[in-house]
Structures are given as structure tokens and as C-alpha cells.
Amino acid sequence: MIGKEIIKGNYIPISEVKVLMEKRREKYEDEEFSYEHGCAWDYVLKFSKLDYENAKNLLNELLELGIDEKTSVKIVDILPKDEIDLKVIYYKKDLPSNYKEIINTVAKYI
């Protein structure tokens, strides 16, 4: 087990994870990542689609549209291009009534 207990939990986009891991790499540049950190780093490099600033701005815009934090982070990570992609995120519940506005907001960052 990597950690003994969860101190605090919140949702953050993959691009923010990338920034945090880059800072850790700089701080401990003499040491190699553990296997788990290496796998996480590979994942972040493959799936991070936006830079930190754009991800943060998009997240704030989605939160202003009334989308909950967890769903907003998933939208930032996946960047759905149309209604079908958005349905993947909302697979357990109905699409919100403002789904077109969500898609248009995301389109500004693609």
C-alpha cells in the first residue's frame, strides 16, 4: 500500500496531476519513480489533453453551468465532442437540459 490513510479527497483533472507529478520529479530528480508512480506518469502523459491553465478555465466554466465537480472533472479529462460522447459520462443518469451549452463550452478548448 502506498499510503496509510486518505487525508483529503477531491477531484482534479489529469492536467493538474501532470503538474503535480512534474514538481515531484524536479524535487526528487536524483531518485527514480516507483513502479506505481511510473505507471501513473505514463497514463498522465498519454491522456492529458489540455494544459493546466486551459483545464482550470474549462473546469470553472463547467462549474458555473451548474455541473457538479466530479462530472466537470470527467468532462475536462475526456473533452466530449458531441452528445454521444457526453452520454458516456452521464451513463447512469439523464443528460442535463443544458447539454448543448456544455458541448459548446468544451468546443472552445478543443
Image (tube, rainbow, N blue to C red):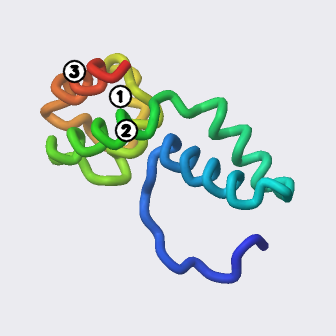
Label ID, residue 100: none
Provide residue 31's location: percent of width, then percent of height.
Answer: 85, 58
What residue is shown with label 3?
104
Q: Do callouts 3 and 2 mark residues in contact (Cβ within 8 Å)? A: no
Residue at 43% of width from left, 64% of height from top?
A: 10
Q: Is residue 82 left or right of residue 95?
A: right
Image quarter where the C terminus lies is top left
- SS at mark 3? helix
- SS at mark 1? helix
Provide residue 75's location: percent of width, then percent of height.
Answer: 38, 36
Q: Is residue 30 left or right of residue 43?
A: right
Gap in Å between the C-alphas at discs 1 and 2? Answer: 22 Å
Label ID, residue 86: 1
Q: Nearer the viewer, mark 3 or mark 2?
A: 2
Provide residue 21's location: percent of width, then percent of height.
Answer: 63, 52
* CA neighbours of label 1 inside 10 A, class few (<14), some (14 to 19), many (20+): many
Residue at 15% of width from left, 41% of height from top?
A: 65
Gap in Å between the C-alphas at discs 3 and 1? Answer: 12 Å
* CA neighbours of label 2 inside 10 A, class few (<14), some (14 to 19), many (20+): few
What residue is shown with label 2?
53
Point out the tag, 1 or 2, that comes first from the N-terminus: 2
Residue at 75% of width from left, 54% of height from top?
A: 37
Gap in Å between the C-alphas at discs 3 and 2? Answer: 19 Å
Compared with 58, 29 (above or below) is: below
Query: In the image, what residue type sits under mark 2?
Result: Glu
Query: In the image, what residue type sits under mark 3?
Result: Asn
- SS at mark 2? helix
Q: Nearer the viewer, mark 1 or mark 2?
A: 2
